[in-house]
Amino acid sequence: MAQTAQQYHVFEIAGGYCGIAWNKVGIVRFQLPTRSADATMRNLLRHVPDAERAAPTPDVSEAIAAAKRYFNGERIDFSNVRLDLDGQDDFFKRIYAALRRVGWGHTTTYGTLAKELGAGPEAARDVGKAMAKNPVPLIIPCHRVLGAGGKVGGFSAPGGATAKVRMLELEGVHLKPPEPAQQSLGL
């Protein structure tokens, strides 16, 4: 079966540049912000190397406008954005569908998502793998998934865990700083 032609667009947001790629089915890739348009384009094209630069369709323009508003701190719901997750593992697709129901300002954990899907605690690692392979972060809000005990956990986007914390803070979620590894003796 021939792959659906993909197109992409890089756009500026508050504090950086994001990228988005789509086909006739829906959005296939979202690149979280980097400091330069060139870096964003390179990161995006690493995942969709055959995509061609194009003007966004009306649906993609709406997603871009929503992303810009999100990074300006506006409460945004991306759950109705059309995606094309073709080629993703079926279990990952189920994880992504469950995660899309976690709304603005809310968080969940890897283990909770696994349990919601009827899997045991060992599946929490699979949830983590799905988050690392999430092709459309922000739209599928992997930044809202925390480790056990509210720990930040990993984040494979530019900026790593710092970017994850910043995105959560935009949504009014403030995580406690990590406990020091060693307690002071107070001497």
Image (cartoon, rainbow, N blue to C red):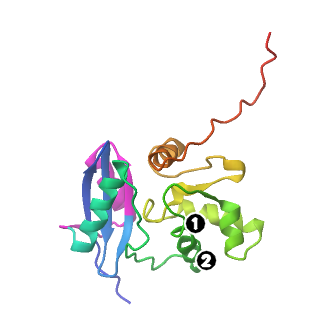
* Disc number for residue 91: 2
SS at badge 2: helix
Q: Please state if 124 lies on the left or on the right of 53 as rendered.
A: right
In depth, the one of 86 and 101 nearer the eye is 101
Q: Please state if 115 lies on the left or on the right of 167 as rendered.
A: right
Which residue is rendered at x = 32% and y = 61% of the image? 66
Residue 104 image position (x, y, % from top left): 48, 58
Establish if 152 lies above or below 92. Answer: above
Distance from the alpha carbon under mark 1 to that under mark 2? 9 Å
Q: Specify the quadrant of the image occupied by residue 80.
A: bottom left
Q: Are marks 1 and 2 in contact (CB under 8 Å)?
A: yes
Q: Please state if 121 lies on the left or on the right of 33 as rendered.
A: right
Which residue is rendered at x = 21% and y = 68% of the image? 56
The residue stretch that appears in magenta: 30-55
In depth, the one of 11 and 74 nearer the eye is 74
Establish if 79 lies above or below 30. Answer: below
**49 is within the stretch colored magenta:** yes
* Crowdedness near tag 2: few (<14), some (14–19) or many (≥20) residues, C-alpha within 10 Å: few
Establish if 184 lies above or below 27. Answer: above
Which one is earlier in the sequence, the residue at label 1 or at label 2?
A: 2
